[in-house]
Structure formats: structure tokens, C-alpha cells
């Protein structure tokens, strides 16, 4: 088991799916228990992975390698490093909690939980696979369950939301496929990502395609594929719709994990295989980050639907992360070898990935709680809820504060790191994005004020307080948020060596500093 | 090889001929009700034919009947493929309700005749033989698409098919006669040699001839702008025949195109160096690429607007021809390899999609999207199977359709950066196609309500579903057997000058 633990983590949900297929559809409780047990075991396995993970090693660990399609040089390669491990743990945690968030799904539960587990396999597979073909297959495997989960169990506009999500992501991923094949044929016919990381920078150096640098072409194709998932402005329009229409647990997964896949892809593929282009694109990346920050915040401010507000807050938060990612070029010679800034920026970005995963998951669960009771999410429609639901209001307050980046909570640490890292290189952008922070605080506080302060709306006098099952799903996330807000050290230790490897790759390319 | 010697390598076709005759004669002894039993004779004959192909020595690569037909693994591959399609279609035909009131003896005999024609098509290396083969296939398919004599649409389909068929084969014949006039021979290799010797002095005539001939071939694979017959014929013909027409003659058409353009206009040799431009100044890669782009884009865009599933699948099959054409501009061995892999994958998923349409209709449903509303709730197994076929046709991993597309894109990208635009257009086209394929899934599952009674298909139907759906998934995960089969079949009879 020790050597194949990654395979177990990936394929366990498929086993669960097979078991679920055998259970009659009336036995809803058994279906839920199976899902809970499978995701629970998987979560424990990811924790086990963490406990045996060697943090001093920035490379890949627990590697697995097997022949798959030798005639096309496709191999089954898995591995985990400091970049993927936090995401794997987050995935394990959120899928486990998500099972309980899904407890009240009221129709076709068999299909729901089977697809839920398939989605789980797809996500884990993307984070753990190190063969580009395998990566792509897992990347696409996620789409179908997601389509059904939104389309069958979602809100009133679910059909439109589901197909829009599917079309957007497929559009991105087919471009990615072209880029993957271009890499394959130009770098000696291999899908092995480790090999590509070594060969791609040298092989593609100076190669021109139709008057454009090959590196830039591949970078842009891959970037579009990943950016749609993140989502980076202007590819974000699927997100509010999908988030709002999806059932609560799926919104949690979508915001908590699926958005991270895009960032993960950029860091794993674009940064390490095409480091030259990082220099070329970093300015644009930071600028896109700024647009995300401002645009997301403005849109969130304008929302009347609480879930949509939380959805746009994701766009906003992803912006900080992009700015932090762009800071990696600080470590280059052209920027004075500022290694500390690069570490802060990149580390902050990855930390932000994790924190946004926990915070937005928490926010969506809380939105689900109120929707379950009031059957609407209109911010204006509530008022004074703090008196009728004090515990719930308290938790929402903490979650909102985490979302707006209050010091002492984890969101603050990662956002601050992003800005500290980016400041030496992108002063203007960082200064401009502080406006976004202000708006960020504004939309959360204003929403809180309208919903929980003031006169108690008589209609909601008797709203039941948050129940134990719901508390069980929120509290772990809350604890993580508070813990990492006060003591982020364990997390940063976990990722730092891998971050140094990535920074090294990028910084050693003595590119010219950015286009901006 | 001379005529007598050739017979020893001609067993598959001989068995097929006997099968056709036996089927026709046996049908005389059956009452109209029992006429369907002729299917057994055809199945038996096809099995023997398959065995005959199997036992042949695959290392022999030669020509038969004094350079009329080629005998090579490439032809054997397509013959095997055609047999598999035919067997599947015969099983499917057993379960269709459309043929209920018809005597089906001739139906199966005509299918066998079509198989014979396609066998000739995939191995012809003589212009006359090319023409004869295409006509055998066409004429039997005219009759088959008009098989429902009482149905106006079926009649319309047959008539349209005849008119378009006659027109395009006329144009093709004109092209062939120009080639004959220039080369003084109908044999591929003699033509190829003559073209070398002409040294480009008759470029215009050759270009014109090639375009005319392409019209004939394009009609068989329903490439735009020779596709106009496709939707109406596909809609009017019995659905089992539509399924057949969308796979088998298309495969044979591709085999013919590959062989003809490689051996007459190409260097006929290694396939590695795309040298179609050697003889004529026509920009071959660009021409094929443009044909591919137009075919898939038009197919996909029009498919979106259809309300009948049968018609939607007709346009989708045009789009799939476009995808396959994408690999031809390179005319590299990789391109041919990709087309062959694609055809195998395409066979399973496309026949599967049509069989679902047939099955739903035979259960009292119809062919429009409305008839499929809530199907996933009423017949979950059919719904799931149809979802697999739709995903496979879109090319979403892990399905066979993805692997097919993957190889096509790989072939295009392998041709070099100047072809990347084609791969990107092809990729974007699969995004467009997602919309209408998922529409089927949407009406089946996202619409309609959970139903109390669940309909489970009979065991025979389930077996056909499994035979089509399992490969559609398994070959998306592990396709080494297919890849090996295709790569062993990638040997042509060639005569390098």
C-alpha cells in the first residue's frame, strides 16, 4: 500500500462508485454512508500522505510509474510534491465534508453520489498525475460529472449553467490538448512531465512558429485552458452562473477545489516547462490579477443574491493570487535577485489557493444553510438575523472577516504575502489593487449589515438555528482558518522547498523583465 | 499476378459471391414472414469470409488479376472493418420496427452485395475497377435507402440519392477519362509513371482531373460541398441503413481516397515525404485542409439546428468526415494511421447512437428531441448508453472517440507548425459539437421527471448495446490492440519508381 498510496487515493472513489451501483436506489441512507466512508478513508489517506511526506525534499515523492500505451509513449506516472500535497489534502477534506453538505439532496441520490465520487477521482487525478496525457484525461473526466451535478440537482437556470460551464471548460481544454501535442512532438515524443520540465526550456529556445516564439504560443494556449478554470477575466462569466445554480455541496467543491486546478496547472505546467515565457507574461498576469480584483469586487458589491456575491468574491480573491504568482520574477537577475519577494509572492499564492479553498467552502456552506431555511438568498430580504440565529451569525461574521482578509485569519496572511512579494516588481499594480481590498471589505461588511443587523424581519423570527450536521461541516474549516491565521508556519514549511524549486527554474532563465 | 494465380488469393470475395447467390436462392424458399432468416446465411457467409481473410498470409503484398486489385494488409484491414460493421448492422436490423412489414430477404442480399462492392473499392488500383466498385456500392445503397416502399420519405431519399449519385459519378468519370487520355492507361502505376514523364507539362489537365475525381470520392464520404444528399437520404432511409451508410461506405471511400491520391498523385512510396506537389502545382495540403475545415464546420453548425436526431446524426457524420479529412493534407503514414484508428472508434460510437434511435423508435418513441425527453428516467440503461455514445462522438475522454480525435490531432500537429491552425480549428469544432451532442443528454436526463416504472431492454438488445458501448469506453482507456492492428495493416502495395 505504501508504494501505491497515490493510486489508492485516486481510484478509491471509483471503487465506491461500483459499490453504489449495486445498491438499490431506494436505500438512500446506505448510499450516503458509503460515500461518507469512501471519502473519509480517502481523507485519512491524504493525511497519512502528509505525515510521511518529507518536507525537506522539494521534488516529487511517492512516485508511481507503469506502462500504459507504449506505442505512443504514454505512461501512468503519479507523484506528489509540496505544490500538490496541500491541494490533495484540501480535496480530501472538502469531498468528505461535502458528503454531509449533500445530506439533504432529495432526488436521484444514487446518481448524485456516484457522480460525486467520479468527480472526486477526476480532481485527485489531475493533482497527482505527472504524465501529460493522464493529466488531460483526468482534467476532462471532471467535466461530465460536473455537468450532471449542476444540471440535474441545481437551481432554476441549471441547464443553461451546466452547458455553459461545459462549453467554456472544453473550449479551454481543447486548446490545451493542441499545446500538449505540440510539446509532445517538439520535445522528443514524451508526455512525461518531469522529462518535459527538463527538455522543453532548451528544445523550444529560439524556435519560431509563424513569426512567433514557440514558447509564447504554447504558453498562451495552455494559459487560456487554465485561465478559464481559475477563472481569469475575461473568461470568468461561466463562474457566477455555475456557482449560483449548483447545489450547495457542488458550489463548495467548485469554489474550493476546481478553481484551484487552473492555478495549479499554470504553476505546474506553464511555470516549470515554459519558464522563459513567465518573464514575458508576468506583467500581463499581474495586470489580469488587478482586473480580477477590481472587477470581482465591483460585481460582488452590486449583487443582491448572496450566493452570487460569494461567487464574485472568488473572482476577486483569485486576483490576489495571480498578482502573487506574477511576483516570481522578482528572483531574477533583472530584478535584483530578490529571492525573498519571490518566495513571499509564490508562497502567498499557493497559500491563498488553500485558504480560498477553506474560506469560500465555508461561505458556500453558510449560504446553503440560510437558503435551506428561508428558501431564498436575497440579501435585502433578510435583516436582523443576528437576534434569531446568533450562533449562525457569529460563524458568518468570522467567515466574512476571513473573506475580507482580517488579520488573525488565514486569508490575511496569504493576501499580505502576495502583495509583499509583488510590491518590488509591480508597484503600481499593487497600489491600485488596494482599492480592491477596500471594496472587498465593503461588500462583505455591507452584506453582513443588511442581513444580520437592524430590524428583525418578522418572517424570519422563527428560523431554526444552525444544526449539528451543518456545524460539523463548517467548524473544521473555521478551525483551519483561525489556526493558519495565527500560525501559518506548518503550511509554509510544507510548500517552501517546492516553491524554491519553481522559483529556481524561473529565475535561472535570465530573461528580459516583463513586457510592461 | 495472372488471373488464375490470383484466384488463390481471392477466397474472401469468392466466398462472398457464393453467399450472395445462396442468400438470393434461399430467400425463394422462405415465406414472407420467414424472409428475415436469410440474415443467417449472410452472417454465416460473412463469418467464412472473415476467416478467409484471417488465414491469408499477410506477408504477401501483390496485385491480383493483372494489376486490377491490390492485395495488401491495408485492404485486409478495411475488409475486416467492413465485415464487422455489416455484422453489427445485421444484428441491428433484426431489432428495427421499420422493416416489420417488408420482405427482408433482398435487404440482406443487397447488404452482402454492398460488402462485395466495398471490398473492391478498398483494393482497386485500376480506374475502371474504381468506377465499377463505386457503382456497385452506390446502386445497392440506392435500393436500400428506398427500401420502405410505402414511405414517401424513403422514396424521396432513394430518388435524391440516385440523382446526386449519378451526377457525381458522371463528374468523376469525366475526371477519370482525362487521366486516361493523358496517361494512356487505367492502371494506377502506369498513370503515376506517365505523370513523371510528362514532367509537369500537363499540370492544368491533371489538376482539373483530380478535382473532378475528388467530387466522386467526396460524394462517397459526404464531404462538403458534395454532401447535399446526406441529410435527406439519412433521414428517409431505414435507420439501420442510415447507420450502415454512415460508417461502411465512408470507410471504403477513405480507403479509396488514400490509395488513389497516394499512388497516383503522390510518390506512391514511403508516405513519409508528402510530395503531392511533385507533379502538379496545385497546393494539395491546403486544398484538403480547406475541404476538411469546411466539411466539419458546416456539419457541426447545421447539426446544432436539427430537431430530428436522425438528421442531427447525419450532419454529425458529415462533421466526422471533416475530422478525418484533417489528417489527409499531411498524407503522412501518421495521417493514414490516424484515419484508420478513427474509423474503428467511429464505427462503435456511431452505430451505437443510431441503434439507440432505432430502439427508442421501436418502443413507440420517435426520432425528434421531444421524443427523447425524460428518456434517461424511463429507460436508464438506454440513457446511460446513449450518453456514452454522445460523449464519445464529442471526443471527451475516457472514450474511444477521444482517442480517435487524439490521433487525428497528433497527425496534424506532427506535420509541423504550418498545420497547427488546422488542429486548432478541428479542436474548436469539437467544442461546437459538444453543444448538440449534450443536447441529447440534456433532454434525456435534465428534462422530464423521475418515473415509477423503469423499462429494461430485452437481453438481445442489451447484448448489442454492450457490444457497442463497451468498446466505446474500453478503447478510450486501453487501445493498444487497435493501435497494433492498425500499424500492422499500414502496408500498401506500392510500386516505387
Image (spheres, coloured by chain):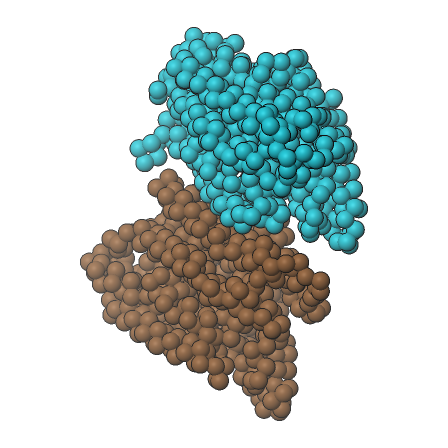
Chain colours: A cyan, B brown
Q: Residue furthest left?
A: B201
Q: Is residue A185 left or right of residue B479?
A: left
Q: Is residue B417 left or right of residue A74?
A: left
In the picture shown, does residue A159 fall above or below B77?
Answer: above
| Residue at image location 76% in from the left, 46% down from the top | A31
- B258 or B405: which is nearer to us? B405
Residue B428 % position (x, y): 42, 47
In the picture shown, does residue B357 fall above or below B294?
Answer: below
Q: Is residue B276 left or right of residue B462?
A: left
Q: Toward which corner of the image does residue A67 lie, by quadrant?
A: top right
Residue A420 % position (x, y): 50, 12
| Residue at image location 61% in from the left, 18% down from the top | A410
Quadrant of the frame with the N terminus of chain A: top right
Q: Is residue A486 left or right of residue A277?
A: right
Quadrant of the frame with the C terminus of chain A: top left
In the picture shown, does residue B104 fall above or below B457?
Answer: below
- B485 or B102: which is nearer to us? B102
- B172 or B196: which is nearer to us? B172
Residue A218 seen by the camera:
no
Residue B192 seen by the camera:
yes
Residue A175 % position (x, y): 45, 40
Q: How many marks?
A: 0
In the picture shown, does residue B475 fall above or below A55?
Answer: below
| Residue at image location 72% in from the left, 41% down from the top | A103
Residue A180 % position (x, y): 48, 37
| Residue at image location 52% in from the left, 63% down from the top | B369
Amino acid at each position: 500500500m505504501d508504494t501505491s498510496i497515490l493510486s489508492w487515493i485516486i481510484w478509491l472513489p471509483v471503487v465506491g462508485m461500483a459499490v453504489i451501483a449495486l445498491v438499490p436506489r431506494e436505500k438512500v441512507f446506505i448510499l450516503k454512508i458509503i460515500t461518507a466512508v469512501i471519502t473519509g478513508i480517502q481523507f485519512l489517506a491524504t493525511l497519512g500522505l502528509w505525515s510521511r511526506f518529507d518536507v525537506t525534499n522539494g521534488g516529487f515523492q511517492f512516485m508511481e510509474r507503469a506502462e500504459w500505451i507504449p506505442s505512443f509513449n504514454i505512461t501512468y506516472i503519479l507523484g506528489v510534491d509540496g505544490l500538490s500535497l496541500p491541494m490533495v489534502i484540501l480535496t480530501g477534506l472538502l469531498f468528505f465534508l461535502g458528503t454531509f453538505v449533500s445530506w439533504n439532496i432529495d432526488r436521484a441520490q444514487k446518481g448524485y453520489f456516484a457522480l460525486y465520487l467520479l468527480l472526486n477521482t477526476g480532481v485527485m487525478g489531475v493533482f497527482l498525475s505527472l504524465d501529460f496525457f493522464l493529466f488531460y484525461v483526468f482534467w476532462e473526466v471532471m467535466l461530465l460529472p460536473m455537468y450532471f451535478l449542476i444540471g440535474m440537482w441545481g437551481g432554476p437556470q441549471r441547464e443553461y449553467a451546466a452547458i455553459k460551464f461545459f462549453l467554456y471548460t472544453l473550449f479551454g481544454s481543447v486548446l490545451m490538448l493542441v499545446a500538449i501535442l505540440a510539446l509532445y512532438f517538439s520535445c522528443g515524443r514524451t508526455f512525461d512531465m518531469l522529462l518535459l520540465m527538463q527538455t522543453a526550456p532548451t528544445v523550444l529556445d529560439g524556435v519560431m512558429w509563424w513569426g512567433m516564439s514557440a514558447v509564447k504560443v504554447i504558453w498562451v494556449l495552455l494559459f487560456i485552458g487554465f485561465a478559464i478554470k481559475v477563472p481569469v477575466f475575461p473568461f470568468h462569466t461561466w463562474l457566477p452562473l455555475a456557482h449560483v445554480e449548483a447545489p450547495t455541496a457542488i458550489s463548495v467543491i467548485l469554489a474550493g477545489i476546481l478553481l484551484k486546478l487552473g492555478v495549479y496547472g499554470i504553476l505546474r505546467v506553464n511555470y516549470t516547462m515554459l519558464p522563459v515565457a513567465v518573464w514575458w507574461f508576468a506583467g500581463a498576469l499581474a495586470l489580469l490579477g488587478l482586473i480580477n480584483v477590481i472587477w470581482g469586487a465591483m460585481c460582488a458589491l452590486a449583487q443582491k443574491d448572496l450566493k452570487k456575491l460569494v461567487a464574485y468574491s472568488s473572482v476577486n480573491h483569485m486576483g490576489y493570487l495571480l498578482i502573487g504568482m506574477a511576483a516570481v520574477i522578482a528572483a531574477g537577475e533583472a530584478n535584483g535577485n530578490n529571492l525573498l519577494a519571490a518566495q513571499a509572492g509564490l508562497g502567498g499564492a499557493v497559500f491563498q489557493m488553500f485558504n480560498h479553498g477553506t474560506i469560500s467552502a465555508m461561505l458556500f456552506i453558510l449560504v446553503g444553510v440560510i437558503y435551506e431555511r428561508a428558501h431564498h438568498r436575497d440579501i435585502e430580504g433578510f435583516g436582523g438575523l443576528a437576534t434569531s440565529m446568533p450562533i449562525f451569525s457569529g460563524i458568518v461574521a468570522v467567515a466574512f472577516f476571513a473573506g475580507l482578509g482580517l488579520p488573525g485569519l488565514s486569508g490575511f496572511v496569504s493576501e499580505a504575502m502576495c502583495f509583499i512579494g509583488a510590491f518590488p516588481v509591480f508597484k503600481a499594480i499593487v497600489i491600485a489593487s488596494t482599492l480592491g481590498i477596500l471594496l472587498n471589505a465593503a461588500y462583505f461588511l455591507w452584506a453582513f449589515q443588511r442581513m444580520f443587523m437592524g430590524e428583525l424581519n418578522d418572517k424570519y423570527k422563527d428560523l431554526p438555528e444552525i444544526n449539528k450536521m451543518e456545524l460539523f461541516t463548517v467548524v473544521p474549516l473555521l478551525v483551519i482558518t483561525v489556526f493558519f491565521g495565527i500560525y501559518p508556519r506548518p503550511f509554509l514549511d510544507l510548500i517552501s522547498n517546492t516553491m524554491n524549486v519553481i522559483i529556481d527554474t524561473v529565475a535561472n532563465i535570465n530573461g528580459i523583465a516583463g513586457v510592461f | 499476378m495472372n488471373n488464375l494465380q490470383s484466384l488463390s488469393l481471392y477466397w474472401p470475395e469468392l466466398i462472398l459471391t457464393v453467399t450472395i447467390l445462396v442468400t438470393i436462392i434461399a430467400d425463394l424458399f422462405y415465406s414472407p414472414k420467414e424472409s428475415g432468416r436469410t440474415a443467417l446465411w449472410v452472417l454465416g457467409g460473412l463469418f467464412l469470409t472473415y476467416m478467409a481473410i484471417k488465414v491469408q498470409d499477410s506477408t504477401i503484398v501483390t496485385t491480383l488479376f493483372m494489376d486490377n486489385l491490390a492485395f495488401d494488409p491495408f485492404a485486409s484491414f478495411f475488409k475486416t472493418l467492413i465485415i464487422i460493421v455489416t455484422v453489427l448492422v445485421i444484428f441491428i436490423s433484426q431489432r428495427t420496427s421499420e422493416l416489420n412489414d417488408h420482405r427482408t430477404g433482398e435487404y440482406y442480399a443487397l447488404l452482402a452485395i454492398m460488402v462485395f462492392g466495398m471490398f473492391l473499392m478498398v483494393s482497386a488500383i485500376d480506374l475502371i475497377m474504381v468506377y465499377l466498385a463505386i457503382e456497385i456500392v452506390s446502386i445497392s445503397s440506392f435500393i436500400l435507402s428506398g427500401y420502405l416502399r410505402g414511405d414517401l420519405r424513403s422514396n424521396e431519399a432513394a430518388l435524391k440519392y440516385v440523382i446526386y449519385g449519378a451526377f457525381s459519378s458522371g463528374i468523376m468519370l469525366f475526371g477519370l477519362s482525362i487521366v486516361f487520355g493523358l496517361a494512356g492507361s487505367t492502371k494506377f502505376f502506369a498513370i503515376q509513371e506517365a505523370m513523371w514523364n510528362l514532367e509537369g507539362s500537363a499540370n492544368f489537365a491533371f489538376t482539373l482531373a483530380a478535382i473532378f475525381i475528388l467530387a466522386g470520392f467526396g460524394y462517397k464520404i459526404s464531404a462538403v460541398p458534395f454532401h447535399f444528399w446526406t441529410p435527406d437520404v439519412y433521414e428517409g432511409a431505414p435507420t439501420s441503413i442510415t447507420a450502415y451508410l454512415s460508417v461502411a461506405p465512408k470507410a471504403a471511400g477513405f480507403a479509396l481516397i488514400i490509395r488513389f491520391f497516394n499512388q497516383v498523385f503522390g510518390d506512391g512510396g514511403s508516405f513519409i515525404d508528402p510530395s503531392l506537389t511533385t507533379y502538379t502545382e496545385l497546393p494539395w495540403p491546403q486544398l484538403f485542409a480547406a475541404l476538411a475545415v469546411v466539411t466539419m464546420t458546416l456539419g457541426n453548425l447545421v447539426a446544432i439546428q436539427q430537431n430530428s436526431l436522425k438528421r442531427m446524426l447525419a450532419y454529425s457524420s458529415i462533421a466526422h468526415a471533416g475530422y478525418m479529412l484533417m489528417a489527409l493534407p499531411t498524407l503522412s503514414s501518421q495521417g493514414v494511421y490516424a484515419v484508420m484508428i478513427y474509423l474503428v472508434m467511429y464505427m462503435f460510437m456511431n452505430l451505437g447512437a443510431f441503434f439507440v434511435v432505432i430502439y427508442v423508435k421501436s418502443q413507440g418513441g420517435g426520432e425528434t428531441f421531444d421524443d427523447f425527453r425524460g428518456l434517461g428516467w424511463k429507460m436508464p440503461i438506454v440513457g446511460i448508453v446513449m450518453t456514452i455514445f454522445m460523449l464519445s462522438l464529442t471526443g471527451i475522454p475516457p472514450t474511444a472517440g477521444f482517442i480517435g480525435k487524439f490521433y487525428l490531432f497528433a497527425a496534424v500537429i506532427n506535420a509541423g507548425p504550418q498545420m497547427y491552425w488546422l488542429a486548432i480549428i478541428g479542436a474548436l469544432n469539437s467544442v461546437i459539437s459538444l453543444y448538440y451532442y449534450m443536447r441529447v443528454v440534456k433532454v434525456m436526463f435534465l428534462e422530464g421527471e423521475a418515473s415509477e416504472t423503469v423499462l429494461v431492454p430485452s437481453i438481445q438488445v442489451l447484448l448489442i448495446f454492450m457490444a457497442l458501448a463497451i468498446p466505446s469506453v474500453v478503447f478510450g482507456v486501453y487501445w493498444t490492440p487497435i493501435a497494433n492492428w492498425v500499424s500492422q495493416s499500414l502496408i500498401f502495395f506500392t510500386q516505387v519508381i
